[in-house]
Amino acid sequence: MSYYQQNLECMPREELRALQSERLCYQVKRCYEKVECFRKRMDEMGLKPEDIHGVEDLHKLPFSYKNDLRDYYPYGLFAEPLTNIRRVHASSGTTGKRIVVGYTQNDLDMWADCVARSLHAAGAGEDDIVQVSFGFGLFTGGFGLGSGAERMGAMVVPMSSGNTALQIQTMIDFKATVLCCTPSYAMYIGEEVEKLGVKDQLSLKSGIFGAEPWTESMRQEIEQKLGIKAYDIYGLSEVLGPGVSYECEAQAGMHICEDNFIAEIIDPDTGEVLPEGSSGELVFTSLTKEGFPVIRYRTRDICSLNHEPCACGRTHIRMNKPQGRSDDMLIIRGVNVFPSQIEEVLLKVSGGQLTPNYQIVVDRVNNNDTFDVNVEMSEQFFSDDVKSIEKLERSITGELRSMLGISAKVHLVNPNSIARSEGKAKRVIDNRKLR
Ligand code: DLL
């Protein structure tokens, strides 16, 4: 029997709400006792855990933000002592510092359950061979999908990302039936498969892709190139990693694991909860997380929730594909990049040689993200000395790579050559058609 938690995934809505209420009250009490930041915010609002009686009181609770993870770096928001933490993961923060999240053994079990559900919903089962081509490491993708596939009872091929020729050969030799990676990497693999003319040697039947926005047309292309059905999976490190929500065979929105997470949609400017069906910022509360629980965490992802019953029989509500973000985070080659991180590097390297004027240009060529950073030289530094210019470009490139983990092409440009804006500076030009 394939992995399917029917009792939880198909729970009647009233029962689910009662379960969420019970778990919410417990989690609020726990966080109040164990997490200083949360307790302070509750105290400031004159709120006590006893004031929260169930899901109906959720809106009274304070929000939490990505910057909290920076302010309490690295472990200040953990609700368990480090001796109870089995694993940490990390992701980009809004500045140079990474944000760190921790998982107890129960958290890792719950996470594996959520991902196993996602794989099962995508038609996978214990007879499958799952090639995980998400990065294994501090990023949650590799371990998340790998552990979920193991939990489901499948065999895992933990490839990590990169070395596409070897990826394809392994897929053929090991007879992988399910591929997990970012949609842009899946497109790239698909193209290489076409070039090599080896599509008929693949055993793939489905793919589970996420960690970045992708369109329906990308889905169709991936499906055609690899001869598979392609499913979406969503998540974020602060809330869990992959598996917060996932597509089922209906491929009409991603079911949120509502026994573990409550979702809300709010107006990103006022913080007000929006009526059912509205588009706004997605906010999550983790009901069962022990190591790093979040209450009303502002994801900055803009999307809407679908409360209609789903043809698959699962009762958990669905979220539509995120349509954008309410902050300036970019996802380039699956890596989260904030303009403020680039600013920090430029400031560090500058030494009077650069002006504060820069522009990030992102595009997609042959289904690969290109990432260029144009920086204006200062009048003093500007000269015909090509060698010094190239040296400075190399130094910025190196610093950016160590800050972000991906490479950018850095171009030092003449003073005053980047267009000035009368309002907010246009720091980012994103020419990709991802939505
Ligand atoms: O990207 C977790 C993940 C790994 C999800 C593997 C799916 C598969 P972070 O690095 O913390 O975590 O980035 C989280 O990525 O807030 C969204 O903006 C974006 N994102 C994640 N999944 C999707 C998706 C992982 N399916 C941020 N569609 C989130 C669109 C996505 N955007």
Image (cartoon, rainbow, N blue to C red):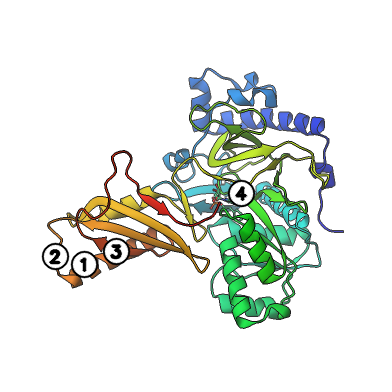
First of labels 2, 4 by sequence position: 4
Judged by depth in the image, the label closer to the viewer, 2 or 1, is 2
Marks 3 and 2, how far apart at CA: 15 Å
First of labels 4, 3 by sequence position: 4
Query: Which numbered disc covers residue 383?
Result: 2
Q: Where residue 183 appears, x then y in whole percent?
A: 60, 61
First of labels 3, 1 by sequence position: 1
Count of all numbered marks drawn on residues in the image: 4
Badge 1 element: helix
Q: Evaluate whether residue 157 shows in this view.
A: no
Badge 2 element: loop
Instruction: Report if the beta carbon of the residue with label 4 is closer than 8 angstroms to ligand 1.
Output: yes
Q: Is residue 239 left or right of residue 92?
A: right
First of labels 3, 2 by sequence position: 2
First of labels 1, 4 by sequence position: 4
Q: Is residue 152 left or right of residue 186?
A: right
Badge 4 element: strand
Instruction: Give the image quarter of residue 199.
Output: bottom right
Q: Evaluate whether residue 388 shows in this view.
A: yes
Three-letter amino acid code of the residue under disc 4 = Gly
- The residue depicted at 33 percent of the width and 40 percent of the height is 424
Q: Where residue 290 appears, x then y in whole percent?
A: 63, 41
Label 3 sits on residue: 411
Q: Are marks 2 and 1 in contact (CB under 8 Å)?
A: yes
Label 4 sits on residue: 235
Three-letter amino acid code of the residue under disc 2 = Ser
